[in-house]
Image (cartoon, rainbow, N blue to C red):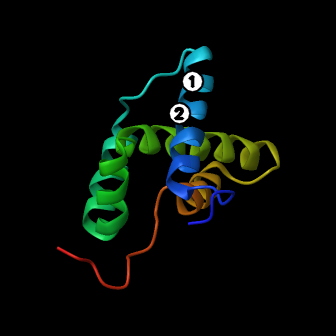
Amino acid sequence: MEPNQKDPDRQQVAWINQEVARYAHQGLVPGAAAEAEAVRNWRHNRYKMYQRLQSLGILEKTAFVLSQKCQEAMNRYVIAGMPPTDAREQAVAEWMMLGPEEAPDR
């Protein structure tokens, strides 16, 4: 890796930690059922990603941040006039339900 090229893992860890801190300032903390569901989904359908996030120490934090991003998107869609059930479905598809990996290494 070239010295001036940024490490994507380090960037991801920094972004997740920054977002967790931002949400903490708003009084939001990890631990919702949606986050646990996301982690289970990723373990089953995105095992490589699950392992990578776990090895970086940001698995639960990532689930928390993406859960918050999902909620924010859902709120924006409802404000824009989308029916709440459609807004939730769209937001979950965008932020939480990542498709399966091609070849899980287990």
Is 26 on the left-hand or right-hand side of 102? right
Q: Quadrant of the N terminus?
A: bottom right
In terms of depth relative to the viewer, which is nearer, 92 or 42? 42
How packed is label 2: few (under 14 Cα within 10 Å), some, or many (20 or more)? some
In terms of depth relative to the viewer, which is nearer, 53 or 11? 11
Q: Residue at x 30, y 50 (%)?
A: 55
Q: Residue at x 58, y 52 (%)?
A: 88
x%, y% of residue 95?
56, 55
- The image quarter containing residue 48 is bottom left
Relative vertical location of residue 49 with respect to residue 9 in this rendering, above or below: below
Q: Secondary structure at mark 1?
A: helix
Callout 1, which amino acid?
Answer: Ala
Q: Which residue is mark 1?
A: 21
State if disc 1 and disc 2 touch (CB < 8 Å).
yes
Q: Quadrant of the C terminus?
A: bottom left
Q: Residue at x 54, y 63 (%)?
A: 93
